[in-house]
Image (tube, grey):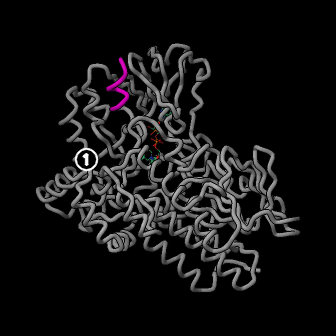
């Protein structure tokens, strides 16, 4: 069999783009295969109103090129989706990436051929390409979840999913809108849709915690200061569990006197953003400590939301930070608007979608348009959509029947020469994705360099190394409260999905050490030939 490429990369989001750049730098031939018409991944698909990143823009950016860091100008504390997509396109132009990206093509199958030690990659356009390595860069939240609510296909009006939003945008002016979900995507889009629509009805299954973003234009003096000391900021971020440079107060919430604790929460609330959960070191370790933070947020909801019944429905009952914390711009305030109705569907599932709306708890709700802000089949959904076949024709689906099993979230035993950027078992979604992506890409690129230098062509995680890592991922998950609720982290949002806490929660610094130790040990835990 003729080798078409040294590496095929699946996906042209931030992971696939940087992977291509590193492969080229290493002198490897590569093709990126991308389903969309353009680069940007998450930021290409998620074009719903209000979409923006809730990691601050100066940190949610590549660090591999100091020139890029210096040249690019972010305009707001939290960048909007169009601005981030603009950045992705700038990177694609700047590094001339598009000529090696095959757009509008989906990889459907990839089979490891044990005779030649090559992957045969098949696409929905009929390509059949042979490649030494396959590197997945498909994103952790890229397989939209459309819940199987009876009658969904019968709805007469348009239905939009936040994770696959029309490129031309949607004008809700004069329309009545029903929206299902209160996760990050809903929390960002609800305030904007409410401002435009005639009426918005929100169907909430689980109330969610959100912290105000206090978004604002970036102060040029602050940007100058960041740019003058970017290396130091990036280095500090790498020492933080989430890979984000914000202050962590390691004190215990419950051991802090009430007045001081309230002062700390007040200051974090006033500053805004995800750093709220780092107000104390034990918020995700100790129920009682967690409750103090949850009570603080609930008191804020009661302060903002005028109708006490609505405030009560909006007040989350579960652990704060267990589901992914959200960051908003005017979310609670939106429920004071006369054109917004909140419907609690927490105790009884939505009965059905009807041609003119939906029926919940025996009551009909009519609207012109339906928005599904219902999330994703996270972490494994995109990977399992491809029919991966490893040694002996074994499928990835079978290998992961009881939940994903990887070595370092980067490789899978039985699937040689397959690398998974930000795969399950890596910190990925618990961190600032961009530095995590860069760390994975650098690790993979360095690995390929090292293999070539030694004349090696096959790398495969050993079963025992994988088992030990899966054990480590499970052990660290059990220490935190984060694994205790029905979140997408444990696959709870997808009926029938195995309940396993999928990301590695030991923190980015510990994870980097684990990856580096494997390299220092001559790729310990891998069989190389
Ligand atoms: O999805 P979600 P998302 N009937 O899964 C509800 C990242 N992200 O797209 O909680 C009724 O969080 C579901 O209810 P429940 C971020 O990591 C980042 O909002 O399962 N309701 C939930 O309320 C985030 O966590 C950014 O009970 C149903 C909602 O739909 C992740 O993506 C922005 C239902 C889904 O919430 C996913 O966020 C956006 C049903 N049958 C997203 N099925 C930023 O960086 C589902 N729901 C800013």
- Residue drawn at x 39%, y 49% is 53
In x, y percent, where is residue 186?
41, 36
**SS assignment at label 1:** loop
Does the residue tagged 1 have its C-beta within 8 Å of any atom of ligand 1?
A: no
Q: Nearer the viewer, residue 232 or 459?
A: 232
Give the image quarter of residue 57.
Answer: bottom left
In x, y percent, where is residue 524?
63, 82
Q: Quadrant of the C terminus?
A: bottom right
- Residue drawn at x 32%, y 23% is 340
Give the residues drawn in magenta, as a range: 191-198
- Residue drawn at x 54%, y 37% is 164
Predominant secondary structure in magenta? helix
Q: Is residue 192 magenta?
A: yes
Residue 119 vertical position relative to residue 212 in the rendered view, above or below:
below
Q: Quadrant of the N terminus?
A: bottom right
Q: Is residue 259 left or right of residue 130?
A: left
Q: Is residue 100 magenta?
A: no
Label 1: few (<14), some or many (≥20) within 10 Å? Answer: few
Q: Is residue 242 left or right of residue 503?
A: left
In x, y percent, where is residue 324?
41, 49
The answer to whether one can see residue 478 in this image is: no
Give the image quarter of residue 63.
Answer: bottom left
Residue at label 1?
A: 216
Q: Nearer the viewer, residue 192 or 423?
A: 192
In x, y percent, where is residue 67?
42, 68
The answer to whether one can see residue 521 in this image is: yes
Residue 504 vertical position relative to residue 291 in the rendered view, above or below:
below
- Residue drawn at x 35%, y 17% is 198
Q: Is residue 362 left or right of residue 305?
A: right
Residue 486 vertical position relative to residue 134 in the rendered view, above or below:
above
């Amino acid at each position: 069999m003729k080798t078409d490429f040294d590496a095929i990369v699946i996906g042209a989001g931030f992971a696939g783009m940087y992977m291509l750049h590193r492969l080229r730098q290493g002198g490897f031939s590569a093709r990126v295969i991308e389903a969309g018409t353009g680069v940007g991944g998450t930021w290409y698909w998620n074009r719903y109103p209000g979409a923006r990143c809730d990691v601050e823009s100066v940190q949610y950016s590549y660090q591999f090129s100091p020139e890029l860091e210096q040249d690019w100008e972010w305009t707001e504390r939290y960048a909007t989706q169009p601005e981030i997509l603009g950045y992705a396109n700038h990177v694609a132009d700047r590094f001339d990436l598009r000529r090696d990206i095959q757009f509008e093509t989906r990889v459907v199958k990839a089979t490891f051929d044990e005779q030649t030690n090559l992957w045969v990659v098949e696409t929905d356009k009929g390509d059949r390409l042979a490649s030494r390595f396959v590197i997945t860069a498909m994103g952790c939240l890229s397989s939209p979840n459309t819940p199987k609510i009876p009658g969904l296909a019968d709805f007469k009006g348009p239905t939009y999913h936040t994770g696959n939003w029309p490129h031309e945008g949607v004008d809700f002016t004069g329309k009545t809108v029903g929206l299902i979900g209160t996760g990050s995507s809903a929390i960002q889009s609800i305030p904007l849709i409410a401002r435009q629509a005639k009426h918005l009805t929100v169907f909430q299954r689980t109330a969610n915690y959100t912290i105000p973003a206090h978004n604002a234009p970036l102060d040029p003096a602050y940007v100058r200061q960041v740019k003058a000391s970017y290396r130091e900021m990036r280095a500090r971020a790498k020492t933080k569990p989430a890979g984000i440079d914000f202050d962590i107060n390691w004190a215990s919430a419950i051991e802090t006197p009430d007045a001081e604790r309230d002062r700390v929460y007040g200051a974090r609330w006033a500053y805004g953003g995800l750093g709220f959960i780092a107000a104390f070191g034990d918020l995700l370790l100790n129920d009682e400590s967690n409750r103090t933070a949850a009570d603080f947020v609930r008191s804020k909801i009661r302060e903002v939301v005028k109708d006490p019944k609505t405030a009560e429905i909006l007040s989350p009952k579960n652990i704060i930070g267990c589901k992914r914390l959200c960051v908003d711009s005017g979310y609670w305030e939106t429920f004071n608007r006369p054109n917004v109705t909140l419907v609690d569907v927490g105790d009884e599932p939505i009965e059905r979608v009807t041609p003119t709306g939906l029926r919940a708890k025996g009551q009909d709700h009519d609207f012109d348009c339906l928005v599904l802000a219902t999330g994703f089949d996270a972490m494994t959904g995109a990977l399992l959509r491809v029919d991966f076949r490893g040694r002996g024709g074994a499928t990835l689906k079978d290998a992961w029947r009881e939940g994903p099993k990887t070595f370092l979230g980067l490789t899978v035993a039985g699937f040689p020469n397959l690398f998974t950027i930000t795969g399950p078992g890596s910190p990925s979604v618990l961190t600032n994705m961009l530095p995590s992506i860069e760390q994975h890409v650098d690790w993979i690129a360095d690995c390929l360099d090292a293999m070539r230098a030694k004349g090696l062509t096959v790398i495969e995680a050993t079963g025992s190394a994988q088992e030990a890592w899966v054990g480590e991922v499970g052990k660290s998950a059990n220490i935190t409260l984060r694994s205790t609720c029905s979140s997408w982290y444990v696959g709870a949002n997808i009926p029938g999905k195995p309940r396993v806490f999928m990301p590695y929660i030991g923190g980015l610094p510990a994870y980097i050490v684990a990856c580096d130790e494997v390299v220092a040990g001559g790729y310990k835990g891998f069989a190389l030939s």
